[in-house]
Image: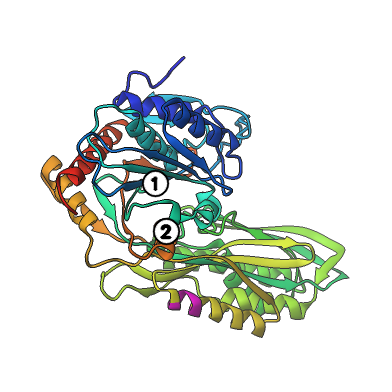
Amino acid sequence: MSVLNQLMPENVFHFFEEICQIPHGSGNLDAICRYCVRFAEERGLKVLRDEGDNILIWKEASPGYEDREPVVLQGHLDMVCEKTADSGHDFAKDPLELYVEDGFVKARNTTLGGDDGIAVAMILALLDEKDAVHPPIEAVFTADEETGMGGAKALDLQLLKGRKLINIDSEEEGILTVGCAGGISCHTSFPLDFSSREGEVVKITISGLMGGHSGSEINRQRANALKLSGRLLYEASRSTQLFLMDAGGGGKENVIASQAEILLMAEHPSALMEAAVKMEALWKEEFMDEEPNLSVQTEKRGMQTANVVSAETTKKIVAYLMAAPDGPVGYNRTLPGLVETSLNHGIMAVREGYLTIDTLVRSSLGSKKAELAERLKILAGLCGASFRADNEYPGWAYKKESSLRELMTRTYREMFGRDPEVLTIHAGLECGLFLDKKKDLDCVSFGPDIWDVHSVKERLSIESTERSYEYLKAVLAGYCREDI
Protein backbone atom coordinates (compact mmCIF):
# COMPACT_ATOMS: atom_id res chain seq x y z
CA MET A 1 0.00 0.00 0.00
CA SER A 2 1.36 3.41 -0.98
CA VAL A 3 2.23 5.86 1.79
CA LEU A 4 3.09 8.87 -0.39
CA ASN A 5 0.35 8.68 -3.04
CA GLN A 6 -1.48 11.75 -1.68
CA LEU A 7 1.58 14.00 -1.80
CA MET A 8 2.36 16.59 -4.44
CA PRO A 9 4.02 16.52 -6.87
CA GLU A 10 2.40 13.15 -7.28
CA ASN A 11 4.76 11.80 -9.94
CA VAL A 12 7.90 12.75 -8.00
CA PHE A 13 6.74 11.06 -4.79
CA HIS A 14 5.53 8.06 -6.78
CA PHE A 15 9.03 7.44 -8.09
CA PHE A 16 10.64 8.30 -4.75
CA GLU A 17 8.50 5.68 -3.00
CA GLU A 18 9.38 3.08 -5.63
CA ILE A 19 13.07 3.86 -5.17
CA CYS A 20 12.72 3.44 -1.39
CA GLN A 21 11.37 -0.07 -1.93
CA ILE A 22 14.61 -1.07 -3.66
CA PRO A 23 17.79 -1.60 -1.58
CA HIS A 24 20.34 0.88 -2.93
CA GLY A 25 23.11 1.40 -0.42
CA SER A 26 26.58 2.14 -1.77
CA GLY A 27 28.01 -0.97 -3.41
CA ASN A 28 24.57 -2.61 -3.69
CA LEU A 29 23.15 -0.95 -6.80
CA ASP A 30 22.29 -3.76 -9.21
CA ALA A 31 18.56 -3.70 -8.42
CA ILE A 32 18.22 0.09 -8.70
CA CYS A 33 20.23 0.04 -11.94
CA ARG A 34 17.90 -2.57 -13.42
CA TYR A 35 14.92 -0.49 -12.29
CA CYS A 36 16.23 2.60 -14.12
CA VAL A 37 16.99 0.62 -17.29
CA ARG A 38 13.50 -0.91 -17.25
CA PHE A 39 11.97 2.55 -16.70
CA ALA A 40 13.68 3.86 -19.85
CA GLU A 41 12.94 0.83 -21.99
CA GLU A 42 9.24 0.90 -21.10
CA ARG A 43 9.08 4.50 -22.36
CA GLY A 44 11.12 3.95 -25.50
CA LEU A 45 14.01 6.07 -24.26
CA LYS A 46 17.63 5.41 -25.16
CA VAL A 47 19.47 4.05 -22.11
CA LEU A 48 22.96 2.85 -21.23
CA ARG A 49 24.31 1.12 -18.12
CA ASP A 50 28.09 1.50 -18.20
CA GLU A 51 30.80 -0.60 -16.55
CA GLY A 52 30.79 1.70 -13.51
CA ASP A 53 27.05 1.09 -12.92
CA ASN A 54 26.18 4.59 -14.05
CA ILE A 55 22.85 4.91 -15.85
CA LEU A 56 22.46 7.34 -18.77
CA ILE A 57 19.04 8.07 -20.28
CA TRP A 58 18.36 10.35 -23.26
CA LYS A 59 15.06 12.09 -24.00
CA GLU A 60 14.33 14.22 -27.06
CA ALA A 61 13.28 17.86 -26.69
CA SER A 62 9.72 19.08 -26.53
CA PRO A 63 8.32 19.85 -30.02
CA GLY A 64 9.79 23.06 -31.36
CA TYR A 65 12.95 22.98 -29.26
CA GLU A 66 14.88 20.24 -31.02
CA ASP A 67 17.62 22.71 -31.97
CA ARG A 68 18.46 23.56 -28.37
CA GLU A 69 21.65 22.22 -26.82
CA PRO A 70 21.00 19.32 -24.42
CA VAL A 71 20.91 19.87 -20.67
CA VAL A 72 22.48 17.26 -18.38
CA LEU A 73 20.43 16.45 -15.26
CA GLN A 74 22.44 14.51 -12.70
CA GLY A 75 22.05 12.80 -9.33
CA HIS A 76 23.53 9.73 -7.68
CA LEU A 77 21.91 6.33 -7.11
CA ASP A 78 23.37 5.27 -3.76
CA MET A 79 22.29 6.18 -0.25
CA VAL A 80 24.02 6.08 3.14
CA CYS A 81 22.73 3.17 5.24
CA GLU A 82 22.40 3.96 8.96
CA LYS A 83 19.90 2.61 11.48
CA THR A 84 19.08 2.76 15.16
CA ALA A 85 20.75 0.27 17.48
CA ASP A 86 17.49 -1.61 18.04
CA SER A 87 16.47 -1.76 14.37
CA GLY A 88 16.34 -5.12 12.64
CA HIS A 89 16.38 -3.54 9.18
CA ASP A 90 18.56 -5.30 6.59
CA PHE A 91 19.68 -2.72 4.01
CA ALA A 92 20.74 -5.51 1.64
CA LYS A 93 17.17 -6.72 1.10
CA ASP A 94 14.54 -4.76 3.08
CA PRO A 95 12.54 -1.83 1.71
CA LEU A 96 12.54 1.38 3.74
CA GLU A 97 9.50 1.88 5.96
CA LEU A 98 8.24 5.34 5.03
CA TYR A 99 5.84 7.57 6.92
CA VAL A 100 4.67 11.17 6.75
CA GLU A 101 4.81 13.44 9.78
CA ASP A 102 4.49 17.23 10.21
CA GLY A 103 5.07 17.98 6.53
CA PHE A 104 8.05 15.67 6.12
CA VAL A 105 8.71 12.25 4.62
CA LYS A 106 10.70 10.07 7.00
CA ALA A 107 11.91 6.47 7.31
CA ARG A 108 11.30 4.51 10.48
CA ASN A 109 14.55 3.90 12.40
CA THR A 110 16.76 4.29 9.30
CA THR A 111 18.17 6.86 6.96
CA LEU A 112 15.74 7.97 4.26
CA GLY A 113 18.11 8.32 1.33
CA GLY A 114 16.73 11.70 0.31
CA ASP A 115 20.39 12.26 -0.59
CA ASP A 116 20.14 11.51 -3.41
CA GLY A 117 16.95 9.53 -4.05
CA ILE A 118 14.95 12.72 -4.48
CA ALA A 119 17.20 13.72 -7.41
CA VAL A 120 16.60 10.39 -9.12
CA ALA A 121 12.84 10.71 -8.50
CA MET A 122 12.67 14.28 -9.86
CA ILE A 123 14.59 13.38 -13.00
CA LEU A 124 12.50 10.24 -13.61
CA ALA A 125 9.35 12.32 -13.17
CA LEU A 126 10.57 14.78 -15.81
CA LEU A 127 11.47 11.99 -18.19
CA ASP A 128 7.98 10.56 -17.66
CA GLU A 129 6.08 13.82 -18.20
CA LYS A 130 4.50 14.37 -21.59
CA ASP A 131 3.64 18.08 -21.32
CA ALA A 132 6.75 19.61 -19.71
CA VAL A 133 8.65 22.10 -21.87
CA HIS A 134 12.31 21.15 -22.05
CA PRO A 135 15.36 20.93 -24.32
CA PRO A 136 16.96 17.56 -25.09
CA ILE A 137 17.66 15.91 -21.73
CA GLU A 138 20.68 13.77 -20.92
CA ALA A 139 19.93 12.16 -17.54
CA VAL A 140 22.91 10.81 -15.59
CA PHE A 141 22.56 8.65 -12.47
CA THR A 142 25.98 7.95 -10.97
CA ALA A 143 27.04 5.08 -8.72
CA ASP A 144 28.66 5.03 -5.28
CA GLU A 145 28.98 8.77 -4.74
CA GLU A 146 28.90 8.33 -0.97
CA THR A 147 31.95 6.05 -0.87
CA GLY A 148 34.42 7.88 -3.09
CA MET A 149 32.50 9.01 -6.19
CA GLY A 150 33.49 5.86 -8.06
CA GLY A 151 30.71 6.21 -10.62
CA ALA A 152 31.64 9.79 -11.52
CA LYS A 153 35.28 8.76 -11.86
CA ALA A 154 34.34 5.99 -14.29
CA LEU A 155 31.84 8.01 -16.34
CA ASP A 156 32.80 8.72 -19.95
CA LEU A 157 31.62 12.29 -20.53
CA GLN A 158 32.24 11.93 -24.25
CA LEU A 159 28.88 10.14 -24.29
CA LEU A 160 27.20 13.46 -23.47
CA LYS A 161 26.73 16.43 -25.78
CA GLY A 162 25.41 18.85 -23.15
CA ARG A 163 27.63 21.59 -21.74
CA LYS A 164 25.14 22.75 -19.09
CA LEU A 165 24.84 20.41 -16.10
CA ILE A 166 22.31 20.70 -13.28
CA ASN A 167 23.33 18.61 -10.28
CA ILE A 168 20.50 17.87 -7.84
CA ASP A 169 22.52 17.05 -4.74
CA SER A 170 22.23 20.11 -2.51
CA GLU A 171 20.21 19.96 0.69
CA GLU A 172 18.79 23.42 1.26
CA GLU A 173 16.20 25.09 -0.94
CA GLY A 174 17.02 28.61 -2.07
CA ILE A 175 20.73 27.94 -2.42
CA LEU A 176 22.57 27.53 -5.71
CA THR A 177 25.91 25.82 -5.21
CA VAL A 178 28.52 26.88 -7.75
CA GLY A 179 31.77 25.45 -6.37
CA CYS A 180 33.11 22.83 -3.97
CA ALA A 181 36.28 21.45 -2.42
CA GLY A 182 38.36 18.59 -3.72
CA GLY A 183 39.67 15.92 -1.39
CA ILE A 184 42.30 13.26 -0.77
CA SER A 185 42.33 10.41 1.75
CA CYS A 186 45.50 10.11 3.84
CA HIS A 187 46.44 7.05 5.89
CA THR A 188 49.13 7.19 8.57
CA SER A 189 50.16 3.79 9.97
CA PHE A 190 52.36 3.05 12.99
CA PRO A 191 53.88 -0.47 13.30
CA LEU A 192 53.05 -1.81 16.76
CA ASP A 193 55.95 -3.54 18.53
CA PHE A 194 54.01 -5.52 21.13
CA SER A 195 55.74 -7.24 24.05
CA SER A 196 54.55 -8.68 27.35
CA ARG A 197 54.54 -6.43 30.41
CA GLU A 198 52.91 -6.36 33.84
CA GLY A 199 51.27 -3.19 35.10
CA GLU A 200 48.14 -1.22 35.92
CA VAL A 201 45.69 -1.01 32.99
CA VAL A 202 43.43 2.00 32.46
CA LYS A 203 40.72 2.55 29.86
CA ILE A 204 39.97 6.12 28.72
CA THR A 205 36.75 6.93 26.91
CA ILE A 206 36.12 10.31 25.28
CA SER A 207 32.50 10.62 24.18
CA GLY A 208 29.46 12.85 23.81
CA LEU A 209 30.96 15.17 21.21
CA MET A 210 28.82 16.92 18.60
CA GLY A 211 30.72 15.50 15.62
CA GLY A 212 29.32 16.51 12.25
CA HIS A 213 30.17 16.57 8.55
CA SER A 214 33.84 17.31 7.98
CA GLY A 215 33.05 19.53 5.02
CA SER A 216 29.90 21.52 5.68
CA GLU A 217 30.46 21.75 9.44
CA ILE A 218 34.24 21.97 9.72
CA ASN A 219 33.98 25.75 10.13
CA ARG A 220 32.24 25.25 13.48
CA GLN A 221 35.54 24.07 15.02
CA ARG A 222 33.93 21.21 16.88
CA ALA A 223 35.98 18.90 19.04
CA ASN A 224 37.58 15.88 17.39
CA ALA A 225 37.86 12.93 19.76
CA LEU A 226 41.04 11.63 18.10
CA LYS A 227 42.80 14.95 18.56
CA LEU A 228 41.55 15.21 22.14
CA SER A 229 42.92 11.75 22.93
CA GLY A 230 46.36 12.79 21.69
CA ARG A 231 46.31 15.93 23.81
CA LEU A 232 45.19 14.04 26.91
CA LEU A 233 47.87 11.38 26.51
CA TYR A 234 50.51 14.04 25.86
CA GLU A 235 49.53 15.79 29.08
CA ALA A 236 49.66 12.50 31.01
CA SER A 237 53.05 11.59 29.49
CA ARG A 238 54.61 14.56 31.30
CA SER A 239 54.12 12.69 34.58
CA THR A 240 54.14 8.99 33.75
CA GLN A 241 55.35 6.54 31.16
CA LEU A 242 52.59 5.13 28.96
CA PHE A 243 52.30 1.85 27.06
CA LEU A 244 49.52 1.68 24.50
CA MET A 245 47.47 -1.52 24.31
CA ASP A 246 44.62 -0.61 21.99
CA ALA A 247 43.00 2.50 20.50
CA GLY A 248 40.02 3.26 18.34
CA GLY A 249 37.65 6.06 17.48
CA GLY A 250 35.55 7.66 14.80
CA GLY A 251 33.72 5.81 12.08
CA LYS A 252 34.10 7.65 8.75
CA GLU A 253 36.78 9.83 7.20
CA ASN A 254 34.29 12.55 6.35
CA VAL A 255 32.72 12.69 9.83
CA ILE A 256 34.28 14.58 12.74
CA ALA A 257 35.10 11.87 15.29
CA SER A 258 32.71 12.08 18.24
CA GLN A 259 34.19 9.30 20.38
CA ALA A 260 37.45 7.51 21.11
CA GLU A 261 38.58 4.69 23.41
CA ILE A 262 42.17 4.08 24.49
CA LEU A 263 43.48 1.16 26.55
CA LEU A 264 46.82 1.78 28.28
CA MET A 265 49.22 0.53 30.85
CA ALA A 266 50.67 3.34 32.97
CA GLU A 267 53.57 3.31 35.41
CA HIS A 268 51.68 5.84 37.54
CA PRO A 269 47.93 5.38 36.90
CA SER A 270 47.03 8.26 39.21
CA ALA A 271 48.86 10.69 36.89
CA LEU A 272 46.83 9.42 33.94
CA MET A 273 43.57 9.74 35.89
CA GLU A 274 44.49 13.27 37.01
CA ALA A 275 45.28 14.29 33.43
CA ALA A 276 41.85 13.05 32.31
CA VAL A 277 40.06 15.11 34.95
CA LYS A 278 42.18 18.18 34.19
CA MET A 279 41.65 17.99 30.42
CA GLU A 280 37.89 17.46 30.66
CA ALA A 281 37.57 20.63 32.74
CA LEU A 282 39.89 22.56 30.42
CA TRP A 283 38.05 21.46 27.27
CA LYS A 284 34.68 22.46 28.67
CA GLU A 285 36.14 25.90 29.29
CA GLU A 286 37.77 26.11 25.85
CA PHE A 287 34.70 25.02 23.91
CA MET A 288 32.49 27.48 25.83
CA ASP A 289 29.37 25.28 26.09
CA GLU A 290 29.50 24.31 22.40
CA GLU A 291 30.26 20.72 23.42
CA PRO A 292 27.74 20.36 26.26
CA ASN A 293 27.91 16.56 26.44
CA LEU A 294 31.69 16.22 26.29
CA SER A 295 32.74 13.43 28.65
CA VAL A 296 36.09 11.91 29.64
CA GLN A 297 35.71 8.68 31.58
CA THR A 298 38.50 6.59 33.11
CA GLU A 299 38.22 3.00 34.24
CA LYS A 300 40.90 1.16 36.20
CA ARG A 301 41.23 -2.43 35.00
CA GLY A 302 43.70 -3.47 37.71
CA MET A 303 47.11 -5.15 37.51
CA GLN A 304 47.54 -7.32 34.43
CA THR A 305 50.18 -9.07 32.39
CA ALA A 306 49.43 -8.15 28.80
CA ASN A 307 50.88 -7.30 25.41
CA VAL A 308 51.68 -3.61 25.17
CA VAL A 309 53.33 -1.31 22.66
CA SER A 310 56.76 -0.01 23.68
CA ALA A 311 57.03 3.33 25.45
CA GLU A 312 59.01 4.73 22.49
CA THR A 313 56.36 3.83 19.89
CA THR A 314 53.61 5.05 22.20
CA LYS A 315 55.38 8.42 22.43
CA LYS A 316 55.57 8.64 18.63
CA ILE A 317 51.84 7.96 18.25
CA VAL A 318 51.00 10.52 20.92
CA ALA A 319 53.35 13.04 19.32
CA TYR A 320 51.64 12.61 15.94
CA LEU A 321 48.14 13.00 17.39
CA MET A 322 49.27 16.04 19.34
CA ALA A 323 51.14 17.78 16.51
CA ALA A 324 48.96 17.01 13.50
CA PRO A 325 46.81 19.96 12.37
CA ASP A 326 43.05 19.51 12.41
CA GLY A 327 40.03 21.45 11.20
CA PRO A 328 40.26 24.64 9.09
CA VAL A 329 43.80 25.60 8.10
CA GLY A 330 43.04 28.22 5.43
CA TYR A 331 40.17 30.50 4.38
CA ASN A 332 39.06 31.65 0.92
CA ARG A 333 40.57 35.00 -0.04
CA THR A 334 37.72 36.08 -2.35
CA LEU A 335 34.66 34.64 -0.56
CA PRO A 336 34.99 35.80 3.09
CA GLY A 337 34.13 33.26 5.76
CA LEU A 338 34.42 30.21 3.51
CA VAL A 339 36.92 27.54 4.53
CA GLU A 340 39.39 26.97 1.71
CA THR A 341 41.53 24.15 3.15
CA SER A 342 40.92 21.74 6.02
CA LEU A 343 41.55 18.24 7.28
CA ASN A 344 39.66 15.82 9.49
CA HIS A 345 41.07 12.84 11.37
CA GLY A 346 38.07 10.57 10.94
CA ILE A 347 39.09 7.05 11.98
CA MET A 348 41.66 5.56 14.34
CA ALA A 349 41.93 1.77 14.50
CA VAL A 350 44.32 -1.11 15.14
CA ARG A 351 44.52 -3.23 11.99
CA GLU A 352 46.84 -6.17 11.35
CA GLY A 353 49.61 -5.02 13.66
CA TYR A 354 49.36 -1.31 12.84
CA LEU A 355 47.61 1.64 14.39
CA THR A 356 46.19 3.58 11.44
CA ILE A 357 44.75 7.08 11.39
CA ASP A 358 42.58 7.87 8.36
CA THR A 359 42.39 11.56 7.51
CA LEU A 360 40.43 13.43 4.83
CA VAL A 361 42.12 16.53 3.43
CA ARG A 362 39.93 19.03 1.55
CA SER A 363 40.65 22.19 -0.40
CA SER A 364 39.15 24.23 -3.21
CA LEU A 365 42.74 24.68 -4.45
CA GLY A 366 44.53 21.60 -5.72
CA SER A 367 47.92 23.01 -4.73
CA LYS A 368 46.82 23.59 -1.13
CA LYS A 369 45.32 20.12 -0.92
CA ALA A 370 48.61 18.62 -2.11
CA GLU A 371 50.62 20.78 0.31
CA LEU A 372 48.58 19.74 3.34
CA ALA A 373 48.81 16.06 2.42
CA GLU A 374 52.58 16.49 2.09
CA ARG A 375 52.74 18.07 5.55
CA LEU A 376 51.04 15.00 7.00
CA LYS A 377 53.45 12.75 5.12
CA ILE A 378 56.45 14.62 6.56
CA LEU A 379 55.04 14.49 10.08
CA ALA A 380 54.29 10.78 9.74
CA GLY A 381 57.88 10.13 8.67
CA LEU A 382 59.30 12.11 11.59
CA CYS A 383 57.15 10.05 13.95
CA GLY A 384 58.20 6.70 12.47
CA ALA A 385 54.98 5.96 10.59
CA SER A 386 54.29 5.02 7.00
CA PHE A 387 52.02 7.19 4.87
CA ARG A 388 49.70 6.52 1.95
CA ALA A 389 47.34 8.81 0.04
CA ASP A 390 44.53 7.67 -2.26
CA ASN A 391 41.00 8.35 -3.46
CA GLU A 392 41.82 11.85 -4.66
CA TYR A 393 39.14 13.90 -6.38
CA PRO A 394 39.30 17.44 -7.78
CA GLY A 395 37.50 20.53 -6.57
CA TRP A 396 35.09 22.70 -8.50
CA ALA A 397 36.35 26.24 -8.85
CA TYR A 398 33.86 29.13 -8.93
CA LYS A 399 33.40 30.55 -12.43
CA LYS A 400 32.98 34.29 -12.77
CA GLU A 401 30.91 33.82 -15.94
CA SER A 402 28.05 31.30 -15.94
CA SER A 403 24.97 31.67 -18.13
CA LEU A 404 23.35 28.71 -16.39
CA ARG A 405 23.82 30.35 -12.99
CA GLU A 406 22.32 33.59 -14.35
CA LEU A 407 19.29 31.74 -15.75
CA MET A 408 18.69 29.81 -12.55
CA THR A 409 19.07 32.97 -10.42
CA ARG A 410 16.69 34.93 -12.63
CA THR A 411 14.14 32.11 -12.68
CA TYR A 412 14.23 31.78 -8.90
CA ARG A 413 13.70 35.54 -8.49
CA GLU A 414 10.73 35.51 -10.87
CA MET A 415 9.10 32.56 -9.12
CA PHE A 416 9.71 33.41 -5.47
CA GLY A 417 10.28 37.17 -5.37
CA ARG A 418 13.82 37.05 -4.03
CA ASP A 419 17.29 36.08 -5.14
CA PRO A 420 18.65 32.68 -4.23
CA GLU A 421 21.82 32.48 -2.19
CA VAL A 422 24.74 31.68 -4.49
CA LEU A 423 27.69 30.05 -2.76
CA THR A 424 30.46 27.50 -2.85
CA ILE A 425 30.77 24.74 -0.26
CA HIS A 426 33.66 23.01 1.47
CA ALA A 427 32.17 19.55 0.94
CA GLY A 428 32.74 17.53 -2.23
CA LEU A 429 30.36 17.24 -5.18
CA GLU A 430 30.65 15.18 -8.34
CA CYS A 431 30.72 18.37 -10.43
CA GLY A 432 34.44 18.68 -9.66
CA LEU A 433 35.11 15.35 -11.36
CA PHE A 434 32.91 16.23 -14.32
CA LEU A 435 34.69 19.55 -14.84
CA ASP A 436 38.05 17.86 -14.60
CA LYS A 437 37.03 15.73 -17.59
CA LYS A 438 35.12 18.36 -19.55
CA LYS A 439 36.54 21.82 -18.93
CA ASP A 440 33.79 23.76 -20.71
CA LEU A 441 30.97 22.44 -18.54
CA ASP A 442 28.77 25.03 -16.85
CA CYS A 443 27.48 23.48 -13.59
CA VAL A 444 25.02 24.49 -10.89
CA SER A 445 23.79 22.35 -7.98
CA PHE A 446 20.48 22.77 -6.13
CA GLY A 447 17.95 20.68 -4.23
CA PRO A 448 15.01 20.68 -1.81
CA ASP A 449 15.25 20.88 1.97
CA ILE A 450 16.58 17.67 3.51
CA TRP A 451 17.39 17.75 7.22
CA ASP A 452 19.72 15.50 9.26
CA VAL A 453 21.14 13.92 6.11
CA HIS A 454 22.87 10.56 6.64
CA SER A 455 21.30 10.11 10.10
CA VAL A 456 18.32 8.11 11.32
CA LYS A 457 16.51 11.44 11.80
CA GLU A 458 16.76 12.30 8.09
CA ARG A 459 13.61 13.97 6.73
CA LEU A 460 12.53 15.42 3.40
CA SER A 461 10.32 18.51 3.21
CA ILE A 462 7.19 17.89 1.14
CA GLU A 463 6.52 21.57 0.33
CA SER A 464 10.14 22.21 -0.56
CA THR A 465 10.15 19.22 -2.89
CA GLU A 466 7.11 20.57 -4.74
CA ARG A 467 8.67 24.02 -5.10
CA SER A 468 12.00 22.58 -6.23
CA TYR A 469 10.40 20.41 -8.89
CA GLU A 470 8.38 23.31 -10.28
CA TYR A 471 11.52 25.42 -10.22
CA LEU A 472 13.46 22.80 -12.19
CA LYS A 473 10.73 22.68 -14.82
CA ALA A 474 10.70 26.47 -15.04
CA VAL A 475 14.48 26.54 -15.52
CA LEU A 476 14.25 24.06 -18.38
CA ALA A 477 11.40 26.02 -19.98
CA GLY A 478 13.45 29.20 -19.65
CA TYR A 479 16.40 27.45 -21.24
CA CYS A 480 14.18 26.68 -24.24
CA ARG A 481 13.05 30.31 -24.59
CA GLU A 482 16.45 31.92 -24.18
CA ASP A 483 19.73 31.45 -25.95
CA ILE A 484 22.20 30.75 -23.13
* Residue 290 visible in the current orientation: yes
Q: Which residue is mark 1?
A: 74
Would residue 108 be seen by someone viewing this image from the given angle? no
Residue type of the residue flagged with mark 2: Phe
Badge count = 2
Tag 2 residue: 434
Tell me if residue 368 is in the magenta stretch. Answer: yes
Q: Rounded to the nearest whole Å, what is the CA distance between mark 1 and mark 2?
A: 11 Å
Which region of the structure is painted magenta? 367-371
In the depicted structure, whether residue 2 falls above or below residue 298: above
Residue at 55% across, 76% down: 324
The answer to which quarter of the image holds residue 261 is bottom right
* Secondary structure of residue under mark 1: strand
Point out residue 23 in the picture as x, y percentages from the top left corner: 57, 33
Marks 1 and 2, the one that precedes in the sequence: 1
Q: Nearer the viewer, residue 317 or 40?
A: 40
What residue is rendered at 54% in x and 81% in y?
375
Residue 141 lies within the magenta run: no
Report x, y in % for residue 438: 39, 62
Callout 2: 10 Å neighbours few (<14), some, many (20+)? Answer: many
Amino acid type at circle 1 is: Gln
Proximity of marks 1 and 2: CB atoms separated by less than 8 Å? yes
